Amino acid sequence: MNKVADLHVHTHFSDSTFSPLAVVREALKQGLSGLGITDHDTCEGVLPAREAAEGSWLEIIPGIEFSCSLKNKDIHILGYFLDCYNHKLQEQLRKFQGARVERIYKMIKKLKMQGVDNIIPEDVLRLAESDAVGRPHLASVLVEKGWVPDIRSAFDRYLAEDRPAYVPKFKQTPYDAIALIHQAGGVAVLAHPSITNIDELIAGFVDAGLDGLEVYYPHCYPNTIRYYEGLARKYHLLMTGGSDAHGEDRSHARIGDIRISYELVEEMKARAARY
C-alpha cells in the first residue's frame, strides 16, 4: 500500500473542534501514514497528538501555521519539522498569543458598542485550549448567547473584516516567519497560494528562503494544481498538501480529503536536515 499524508490539520489548541486524540483517531481511520499538526501560532497540539499516535503506524509531523501580512494582504506560512521547544520560537509564540488575547478583549468592547452586552472575555477564553484564541471562539460564544444562529452569521454580522466588531490581528511579515521557522530547524511553506492570490510575491519569498508551496489543497481545479506544480518546479520548491481540516466545521475539508505521497514528506525531511 502506498503511504500517504495529510500535512495541514488543526486541533482544538487553535480553531478546530477536534482534540489531538480525535484528530489522530480520524487519521488512522483514513489510513494515513503521516499527519501534519499545523495549529495557528502554537505547537501545543503536537505532543498530545504524538502521545495519541504512540504504538501506531501514524507519524506525527510537527508543524505550525503563522498569520502574516505584506502589502495589505493576508499570507499564511506553514512550518514543518521544526523544534517546537526552540527558545526563540517559544518567545515569539508567547508574544503572538498575548496579542490574540488582547484582540478578544478589544472585539468584545466593540460588540458592547453594538448592543451585545452579555459577553465577557472569560466566556471566550474558556473555549480555547491555549492562548491561541481567535474569532471562531468568539463566534461560538455569540451563537451560544443567542445573538446569531450560526458561526457563519457571527462573521457576517460582526466579526468579518468589514464588520463592526472586527479588530486586525497582530501579524509578522512572511520574511520574519520564514526566518523564525528556519532558526527552529524547520522548512517554510507558503500555504494555499491559490486562495491568497499573491503569486507576484513568491519570487521574493524564494529569495528569503521559502522552501515549498502548498500545491494540493481542497477545492482546487486540476489546471490550478498544474500551474502551482509548474511554479514549484520553476523555483525548485517542495510541493506539499493537506486538507486544512478544522474538525466539525463543514466549511473546511475533512482529515484525509487531501493526501500526498510520502515521497514528498521524505523530501521535506531532507530539506529540514539542512537547518
Image (cartoon, helix red, strand yellow):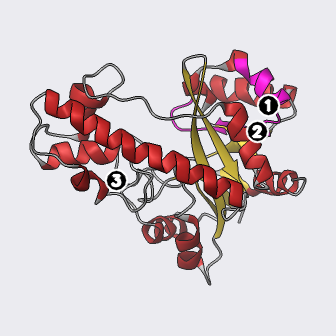
- Judging by the rendered image, the residue that carries numbered circle 3 is 248
* Mark 1–mark 2 distance (CA, rounded to whole Å): 7 Å
Q: Position of residue 85 (x, y in %)?
A: 67, 65
Tell me the magenta residue range: 201-220
Which label's residue is closer to the chain start, 3 or 2? 2
Does 223 appear above or below 126?
above
* Mark 1–mark 3 distance (CA, rounded to whole Å): 32 Å
- Judging by the rendered image, the residue that carries numbered circle 1 is 232
Indicate yes or no whether the magenta region holds residue 205: yes
Regarding residue 247, the answer to whether it shows in the image is yes
**Camera-nearest residue between 150 and 125:** 125
Within the image, what quadrant is residue 59 found in? Answer: bottom right
- Label 2's element? strand
- Judging by the rendered image, the residue that carries numbered circle 2 is 212
- Given this view, does label 3 or label 2 mark the residue nearer the observer? 2
The amino acid on which the numbered mark 2 sits, given as a three-letter code, is Gly
**Camera-nearest residue between 262 and 166:** 166
Q: Position of residue 68 (x, y in %)?
A: 58, 33
For this view, does 41 lie left or right of residue 59? left
Which label's residue is closer to the chain start, 1 or 2? 2
Does 207 appear above or below 214?
above
